[in-house]
Amino acid sequence: MSPNRYNLLIKNKISPFKKNINVDSDKSISIRSFLISSISQNISSVQNALMSDDVKSTIKCLRELGVKILKRKDNSFLIYGKGLGSLCAKKNSSLNFGNSGTLARLLIGILSTTPNIHIKVRGDHSLNKRSMKKLIYLMSKFGASFYPKNKFKFPLKIVSTNMPIGINYNSGVSAQLKSAVILAALNSFGNTEIYEKEESRNHTENMLLKNFQAIKIVKNEKKIIKVFGKKYLNPINIKVPGDVSSSAFFTALTLLNNDSSIKIRNVGLNSTRIGFYKLIKKHNARIQFRNLKKKNNETTGDILIRSSKLSPLKANKSFYPSTADEFPILFVMAALTKGVSIFKGIGDLVNKESNRITEMQKILKQIGIKSVSSNGQLKIFGKGMINAYGKKIRVPNLGDHRICMSAFVLAALTGANAHIKNFETVNTSSPSFLKIMKFLGAKFEIKK
């Protein structure tokens, strides 16, 4: 998390707007591009990487593990790959993952099968609260050890295995766990097979697919990812597109604001990431994807959004994997859409940077929106577009960027008097968020 802490005050409704914007680069692709480059052969290049706190933590950790990373004048990066199994660290040295669960899980995947790793790992206040039990179980199957035994939260110590053996894994909704297994498998003896029961983000596979000697995907009734261990990886050359998850907040703002439209340029539109857009299109959102292109196995394009009269949102559990980051802003949209919205199969939201179900319920209650949650389901009794002048929204320090961004949009649309603590946490994913909001006409005050 950024050391420059500040709170945010919002007191005014936003006016109608018609704008074109570029959002911050994709965080998931940025982090993966540095990690995979570091274990590839020769020199890789990454353009338009997101310069958020999470990506800066990634670069810092890799440099501490002996990877040479140079930033060029055009803000692109050269990563001098060390190859599989070549990252190194002094015994009992430490790494700090900051706020990034993605970095934590994926880098631990790499380190677990890298020889002679005895390293301490930790995160910030928020990340240290999150359970790593499933990750520890999977990496233990490869042969890695974690100390203290039976402790599942950071800080922890990793002792890697010098004889990692490939495993079979039935993956669920977590792309981070799936990616950790793929990255651990690359430096393991024998083959690893991952059976994908539910489709999740596939950026890791996409980035590795040109390495046909190391990874193969078979699609029958289920997707099977086959990883062939101990094969070299080719260098990568990638230009990171805009982040579709960050785009969702500006999309919601536009849809619910009268007489407004926006064009968001050059956004990553990977099919495993656009559940938010598929869902709201079903409920009368006026949205179009334009200028679609495909490069490095990733689809990109522009998103055109116009003010819309939405119907109550109904999301079953099949939407969860491709919509996980966007549920807090979907809850805001549901609150400001007349009728009862129902979200099913969202129980895993309690394990994010905060309990995103409970915390969003608290925020909505402050402006008179009723909601009921039970058994991984949330009902929101939407009132339609309301004026909340005189009502107060108070958001404590949760260390959750998506909650902060959602509360901002809610206040800007309703005119509620919002006080959001530690808004700097948004820098973990979208450091340009406030700059873009100001460009769109939102009024706010920073309190340090």
Image (spheres, rainbow, N blue to C red):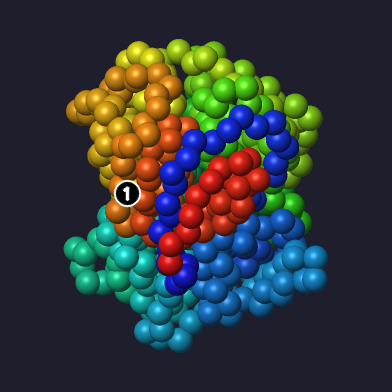
Residue at the (31%, 37%) spot, across then down: 391
Q: Position of residue 348 (x, y in %)?
A: 31, 39
Residue placed farthest to the bottom in the image?
90
Task: Please state, as top left, top right, bottom left or bottom right, where the C terminus lies in the image.
Answer: bottom left
Please indicate, yes or no, whether residue 119 appears anywhere in the rendered image.
yes
The residue under label 1 is 395
Q: Is residue 14 left or right of residue 411?
A: right
Q: Is residue 447 left or right of residue 42?
A: left
Q: Looking at this view, name the residue that lies furthest to the front.
A: 390
Horizontal and vertical percent for residue 198?
43, 31
Instruction: Say what amino acid the circle numbered 1 marks.
Output: Val
Residue 232 vertical placement versus 333 (above, below): below
Which of the 4 quarters of the picture holds residue 138? Answer: bottom left
**Against 413, is 83 above or below?**
below
Q: Nearer the viewer, residue 327 or 367?
A: 367
Nearer the observer, 205 or 355: 355
Q: Quadrant of the N terminus?
A: bottom left
Q: How many marks?
A: 1
Residue 123: percent from the left, percent from the top? 37, 67
Helix, strand or loop status at disc 1: strand
The answer to which quarter of the image holds residue 31 is bottom right
Vertical side of 445 occupied by 160: above or below:
below
Query: What residue sits 44% from the left and 46% below the top?
Result: 10
Using residue 447 as the reference point, say whether residue 67 is left or right of it.
Answer: right
Q: Is residue 263 above or below residue 203?
A: above
Horizontal side of residue 40 vs 60, given as left or right: right
Say which residue appears at 76% left-offset and 41% top-offset.
295
Q: Is residue 196 visible?
A: no
- Kindly identify the residue that appears in the image at 30 percent across and 33 percent down: 367
Nearer-the-camera pick, 6 or 243: 6
